[in-house]
Image (cartoon, rainbow, N blue to C red):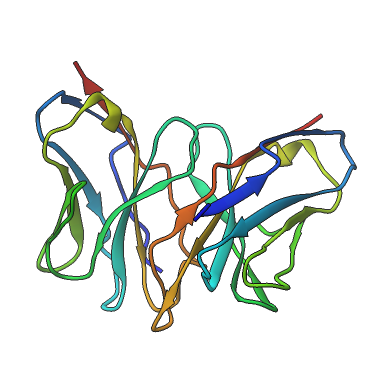
Amino acid sequence: DAKTTQPTSMDCAEGRAANLPCNHSTISGNEYVYWYRQIHSQGPQYIIHGLKNNETNEMASLIITEDRKSSTLILPHATLRDTAVYYCIVGGSGGYQKVTFGTGTKLQVIP
Amino acid sequence: NAGVTQTPKFQVLKTGQSMTLQCAQDMNHEYMSWYRQDPGMGLRLIHYSVGAGITDQGEVPNGYNVSRSTTEDFPLRLLSAAPSQTSVYFCASSHLAGGRTDTQYFGPGTRLTVL
């Protein structure tokens, strides 16, 4: 399964959009892109996922490039409660058995 | 629904002791998995299961055993605890949709210290 690369940390002003990038240049055609976040030491929480098309839900938007080699998670109006570690992972027909979460991006929302 | 539950929340062991971390889900999910998270690190997959009676190894399986006798339960057994197994352990579950794991739901974690 494909590996992902994310920046170690990012800051975002409260109320502004947070754009978190992820590179997955070795992604294969049947692999989905998933985003999770982990607040403090809680269990990771699902945010959104997509295959080819851009996706939006009540939490975030996911923009996937046409070649699918990278994606961006957008939190449209970041709040202090969005401070967390955000993980971008890829998975497909093989399930999650070969996928690691990596170290993710630590997003700090600043008042 | 309770979702994914884990017990205990905290545990301290002495080197060489054995114990079982419990994980249960009430969402009728086929897929269940165990991860460990060391301080400042991401999650690493220990073992996973795609259904009752079926288990397989993940990235870091050594020192751990699992079994899946029912859909709901997926216990993780530490055979002979070592200080290197000090970590936070997360259990997760998801549906299998067309052979692909869907969104994973995580439990609250078990914080294990091995002295």
Looking at the image, which residue is at 9% across and 67% down? A66
Looking at the image, which residue is at 26% across and 78% down? A29
Q: Position of residue B61 (x, y in %)?
A: 68, 59
For this view, does A7 lie left or right of residue B109?
left
Q: Position of residue A106 (x, y in %)?
A: 33, 33
Choose top left, top right, bottom left or bottom right for residue A108.
Answer: top left
Q: Is residue B50 above or below residue B85?
A: below
Question: Considering the image in quadrants, where does the C terminus of chain B appear?
Answer: top right
- What is the residue that sits farthest to the bottom in this orientation? B98
- What is the residue that sits farthest to the front in this orientation? B1
Q: Is residue B72 above or below residue B21?
A: below
Looking at the image, which residue is at 10% across and 35% down? A17
B28, B111: nearer the viewer: B28
- What is the residue that sits farthest to the top in this orientation? A111
B24, A36: nearer the viewer: B24
For this view, does B64 lie left or right of residue B79?
left
Looking at the image, which residue is at 27% across and 32% down? A82
For this view, does A45 lie left or right of residue B64?
left
B40, A41: nearer the viewer: A41
For this view, does A78 lie left or right of residue A42?
left
Q: Position of residue A32 (x, y in %)?
A: 29, 68
Q: Position of residue A48 (x, y in %)?
A: 26, 56
Q: Is residue B63 above or below residue B15?
A: below
Number of marks in picture? 0
